[in-house]
Image (tube, coloured by chain):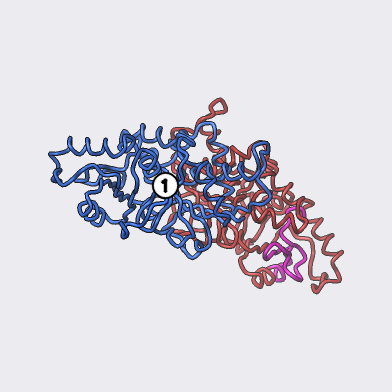
Chain colours: A blue, B red
């Protein structure tokens, strides 16, 4: 089995994806937020690249709306991109919307919904970029083990797709991919072995990510603190977000992107319901 | 001080280099070979991108000629790109040429020379690519500490320039850059501190290289074994080359590229002698 790492999704050629299982990482914070929302009671998350499209989709269906640009909540949006906003599940989002009644949104059109529309600077674009893969999973430290297991079950080569930040390599995405690789190798090798399994062939970026995860294994949070984007979030007072995103294997879910939405259930496409 | 890592020299825009001190890495094997040759008695190494140009330059001046393409010695060239060929210094090269009298070269035109012309697939191109930097050092595991110290003495931002392999990220070059970063941080922080110095700002690729070097610190050879190019060299029976290149801080030299040649002395340009 070949495992390749794509350091910056939108800078790469998606022709490498067909026939492989993709796992997409935007550890700070889109994929961590998606995993948290789905583990907390949301049934579907719609990753949307464009803010206007996200707003229209949420308005049309009464979905919960969340979005971020350059680390900040989009002006007028009820939710940003912090995973902490979604821990309470759909009911808590409804409550927050009630509190935010004074915003430019007419809160009367919002109701509680277990469907969430999310638009972010890098992550949602990377998820959509990966669509030509056989299957697209959403990865993070929070679900590293589960997504490794799910990807292995597909029995195909694996593409670790890092969103990156503004077209550049990002430490935390590579680290997230590395933690999934640690789990992949553990599951292939059995718990007793510390050596990479002979049946896996990693490209050099994947090997580097694996080494990075091993280096930060005892303190994943320090890895999230180290990168440029982590530092930026810290300066904006988002330390709790980093602490949340650094929890290794908190959730046992492997969210799949179903062309329009991400889900953990064998959900049907939007058009049929 | 800003430290940036360029993962694949020829794929990057050299506009980032002016005003920075560059350290170029082609750990397997060009820069390791250059460092070994200069530490072993060669006075100058000419990095040449093109094999024909290399041959002409060596013929014209009676320099020692070495070259590699895709890991193999260039057909008809007296030397390849193994550092082991240059450990004995210029005299040993002369001896080897005498032995190789039966080759397509007329060995009578070759004499011992302390000037070496080297052309390789990735490394010599990367060194020339870095020319717009304030100064271009040649880095490897063999001289990580010395090159870190020399670069710091320039007092400028530092560009860690990895040659990569055939346009792709290579583990060993990033690892070499990481070992130099370990030394840079140690020298900035003093020996007592294990923390990165506050006065250094690393981009995410540099931080990843640093983590990688820390991960492989107790066994650099395993890092050279792990990558795709290391594996290829092993399959060709070059394990001794990898063992040689994995020797951390064997040499206390910081070779500088002087537009035409690399040297460790305050040498004068070719045109003036």
Write the residue at 30% across / 56% down: A273
Is B102 on the left-hand or right-hand side of B261? right
Q: Is residue B78 one of those drawn in magenta?
A: yes
Question: Hey, which quadrant is residue A131 in on the image?
Answer: bottom left
Q: Is residue B258 one of those drawn in magenta?
A: no
B208 and A183: which one is in front? A183
Q: Is residue A240 visible?
A: yes
Magenta segment range? B58-85
The vertical placement of B12 against A175, above or below, is: below
Is B91 on the left-hand or right-hand side of A81? right
B146 and B181: which one is in front? B181
Image x and y of residue A128, in percent: 38, 57
Image x and y of residue A257, in percent: 41, 54
SS assignment at label 1: loop
Task: Using the image, name the chain to which the residue with label 1 belongs.
Answer: A
Write the residue at 26% across / 35% down: A92
Check disc 1: other Cα within 10 Å, few if <14, some if 14-19, many if 20+: some
Give the residue number, with chain letter if any, for mark 1: A264
């Amino acid at each position: 089995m070949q495992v390749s790492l794509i350091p910056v999704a939108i800078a790469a050629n998606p022709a490498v994806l067909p026939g492989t299982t993709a796992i997409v990482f935007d550890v700070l914070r889109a994929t961590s937020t998606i995993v948290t929302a789905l583990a907390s009671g949301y049934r579907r998350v719609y990753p949307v690249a464009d803010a206007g499209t996200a707003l229209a989709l949420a308005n049309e269906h009464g979905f919960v709306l969340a979005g971020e640009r350059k680390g900040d909540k989009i002006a007028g949006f009820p939710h940003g991109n912090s995973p902490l906003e979604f821990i309470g599940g759909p009911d808590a989002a409804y409550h927050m919307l009630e509190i935010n009644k004074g915003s430019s949104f007419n809160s009367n059109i919002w109701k509680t919904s277990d469907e969430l529309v999310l638009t972010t600077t890098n992550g949602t674009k990377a998820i959509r970029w990966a669509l030509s893969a056989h299957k697209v999973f959403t990865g993070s430290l929070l679900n590293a083990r589960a997504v490794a297991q799910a990807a292995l079950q597909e029995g195909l080569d694996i593409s670790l797709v890092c969103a990156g930040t503004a077209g550049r390599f990002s430490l935390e995405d590579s680290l997230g991919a590395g933690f999934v690789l640690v789990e992949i190798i553990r599951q292939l090798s059995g718990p007793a072995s510390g050596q990479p399994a002979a049946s896996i062939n990693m490209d050099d970026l994947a090997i580097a990510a694996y080494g990075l995860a091993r280096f930060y294994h005892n303190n994943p949070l320090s890895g999230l603190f180290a990168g440029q984007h982590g530092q930026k979030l810290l300066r904006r007072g988002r330390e709790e977000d980093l602490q949340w995103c650094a929890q290794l294997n908190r959730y046992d879910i492997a969210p799949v992107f179903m062309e329009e939405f991400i889900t953990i259930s064998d959900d049907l496409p939007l058009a049929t319901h």
